[in-house]
Structure formats: C-alpha cells, structure tokens
Amino acid sequence: MNLLQCEHVSFSYEGKPAVTDVSFDVQEGDYLAIVGENGAGKSTLIRGLLRMKKPSAGNVLYGDGLQQNEIGYLPQQTQVQRDFPASVMEVVLSGCLNRLGRHVFFTRGQKAEAEKNIEMLGISSLKDRCYRELSGGQQQRVLLARALCATRKLLLLDEPVTGLDPLVAANMYQMIRDLRKKQGITIIMVSHDVGGAVREASHILHIANRQKFFGTSSDYRKDPIGMGFLKGGME
C-alpha cells in the first residue's frame, strides 16, 4: 500500500528553488534513506513531507488515511534544544501534543503510551532525569520515544546518528531496524552516513537539488550515481 507519494514535487527555501521535480513513493513497511551533499535540499524536502512547507509545484499524496499528526518526526537538534530543561517523561509526552484535541491534560492512555515507548527504548531508568543532563545518545533515544508517541505508521528521521560515536550510532540503527521489523513502522531517514544508509535502508532517494536516483539499495550500489557517492563518502 502506498503510504506516501510525491509527483514531480518542487520546494523553495527563502524564495529560491531548493528541491526540483522529485518523484518517488513509499510503500507501507519501506525504509527509505534520503542522501546527498550538504545543501542538496534534503531537510527542505523533509519539511515538505511534514506539510511544514507547501510545494511550489507537484503534489504530495498520503495514503492509508495518514494525517499530519500521525507522522513521527525526529529533527536535527540545536544547542538550545539539547539544553531543554524538562524531564525525560515530559519530553516524551510532548510527542502526544498533536493528539490532545480538546483535552487540556494528557490522558491516561497517552501517559501509558509514553511509558511503553520509554521502556521499549531502554531508558526507563532515565525517566525522571533532566533531559539536558543526558548524553547525546541518550537524548536521541528520548527524542525517538517522543516521535513514536506521535505515530503508529510513519517515522521521519533527520540525521539521527550525526554526532554519535560509532557504537552509539550502531545501537541507534538497531533500534530503528527493530521499529520497522517488530512494530511495522515505515521509516524515512535523511542521512550523511551514506554507507550506513545503503546498508540499512530498503530504498534510496539521492537528490542534488533535483532527483538523481530513486530505487532499491541494491540497485543504487550498481548505479553510477551511487557508486560515485559511496566511494566519496567512504574515503
């Protein structure tokens, strides 16, 4: 089933074209990695998929009744966000904000869901800790638990392993793999780690302000675009 489809989509950033004529689809259960150089328009595309930006051309279509508040999002962190003075539980619960509706307070079910996601990601012992006191890897787990509170279908991850040491990055990849296989969550991940992206993802979208490649990871390894980028990314 098509969960998301882009048809000749373009997005602008500060009035200038950032991504032009991109077409791809994401099926339920896929793991799509979006790769490309700095400034290629990857984060702008993600903002468009989150409906935070309107396309300047083309269409973004959502299937299976997917609503904006059913998309989980793990953004790149700024220093201000890393220093956020809230408890781990408060940060994770904030992932339910879009589903509060007319409620003023989080429901018992939402609190239970936050507890479940905290336990699933192995951070129960950190529940009452202040978020800004945690390591980078611990913070990423908290943010992943927060994103899971917003979705049961689609998770968008913007550079989830950037700045993490290799062991912590490997653990993050394992958690993402488990979410897809065990929870059935569809993954879209922006990554500068092209080797990890090709190893982990089922599909690759390579952009350089316009689409250069879209297809399976195995086909990307054989394509001149993929072969060149992999060689450059691993030197």
Image (spheres, rainbow, N blue to C red):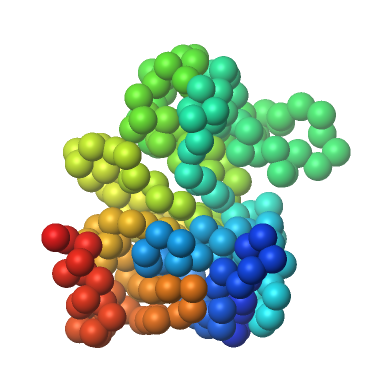
Q: Nearer the viewer, residue 190 or 185?
A: 190
* Location of residue 26 with respect to 67 vertically, above or below: below
* Location of residue 211 with respect to 122 vertically, above or below: below
From the top left corner, tell me how far across and down residue 22 is, in percent: 53, 80
From the top left corner, tell me how far across and down residue 187 is, in percent: 44, 60
Query: Which residue shows up at 46% across the image and 32% down it?
Result: 142
Q: If the image is split into quadrants, where does the C terminus sit?
A: bottom left
Q: How many marks?
A: 0
Regarding residue 112, the answer to whether it shows in the image is no
Instruction: Name which quarter of the figure residue 9 lies in.
Output: bottom right
Query: Which residue shows up at 28% across the image and 80% down it?
Result: 225
From the top left corner, tell me how far across and down residue 17 is, in percent: 61, 72
* Location of residue 23 with respect to 98 vertically, above or below: below
From the top left corner, tell me how far across and down residue 193 is, in percent: 28, 56
Q: Is residue 162 left or right of residue 222?
A: right
Query: Which residue shows up at 26% across the image and 43% down it?
Result: 169
Query: Which residue shows up at 43% across the image and 73% down it?
Result: 208
Instruction: Name which quarter of the figure residue 19 lies in.
Output: bottom right
* Location of residue 171 with respect to 190 vertically, above or below: above
- Most extreme residue toward the right is 102
Q: Nearer the viewer, residue 87 or 166?
A: 166
Q: Is residue 9 left or right of residue 123?
A: right
Instruction: Name which quarter of the figure residue 233 lies in.
Output: bottom left
Regarding residue 59, the answer to whether it shows in the image is yes
